[in-house]
Amino acid sequence: MSLVRRATVEDAGEVLRLRQVMIDSVFSGANTGASAEWHSASLPTLRARLAEPDGDFVAFVVEHPERPGALAALVAGTLEYRIGRADNPHGRVGHVFSVATDPDARRRGYARACMEELLQWFRERGVPHVDLNASAQAEPLYESLGFTRKPDPSMRLSL
């Protein structure tokens, strides 16, 4: 039996806690509003998304082996649609985000196991490309799974 399972509505609070772990580690020193005050506003939306069995959002988790009720690792992803092109005529693109492992549960293969489950979820949906943003610390994991750096012309407008 796999350590990895799909996150449920009951996991929402822990999913947000691990997302905060990821935010704090990736953006340390940046003004990200590192407090957890936003969790209460996000919780109802996350619960609703986790309740959709066939939706375009999924999270895979590993339970913490030493702390009952806590999660050790999280990987979340979405299935996005973009107008097709030659190498992706159906326009399906996967996006990975919120890859996080509790600091006291790192180096046990949990993030890799969750990523492998998420990548299988994308494969089952016919997704030919999966994108993610990688920290320098996590890049070796992603490279070992076959991800490569690409020139990224992304821009963002905050509304």
Image (cartoon, grey):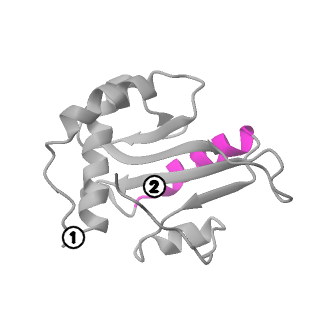
- Residue visible at 77% across and 42% down? 126
Q: Is residue 123 visible?
A: yes
Q: Main secondary structure of the magenta part?
A: helix
Which of the two marks, 2 or 1, is nearer to us in this view?
A: 1
Reply yes or no: does residue 55 show up in magenta: no
Tag 2: amino acid: Ala
Tell whether 45 sits left or right of 116: left
Toward which corner of the image does residue 40 lie, by quadrant? top left
Q: Which residue is mark 1?
A: 30
**What's the magenta region?**
108-125
Left or right: 109, with 86 as reference point: left
Residue identifier under label 2: 111
Which residue is located at x 57 percent, y 73 percent?
153
* Residue 111: percent from left, percent from top: 45, 55
Q: Position of residue 157 (x, y in %)?
A: 40, 60
Residue drawn where x is 84% and y is 49% of the image: 89
Q: Residue at x 18, y 66 (%)?
A: 31
- Image position of 46 (left or right of 13): right
- Which quarter of the picture shows residue 49? top left
Percent coordinates x, y for residue 7 in the rendering: 43, 32
Question: Which of marks 1 and 2 precedes in the sequence?
Answer: 1
Q: Residues within 10 Å of mark 2 (few under 14, many from 20)?
A: many
In percent of width and height, residue 73 lies at 38, 48
Q: In the drawing, does residue 144 fall left or right of residue 96?
A: right
Alpha carbon of mark 2 to alpha carbon of mark 1: how far? 24 Å
User: Is residue 123 depicted above or below 30 in this figure?
Assistant: above
Q: Secondary structure at mark 1?
A: loop
Q: Mark 1, residues whose alpha carbon is within 10 Å: few (<14), some, or many (≥20)? A: few
**Residue in front for this viewpoint, 86 or 60:** 86
| Label 2 element class | helix
- Residue 12, placed above or below residue 61: above
Whether residue 110 can be seen here: no
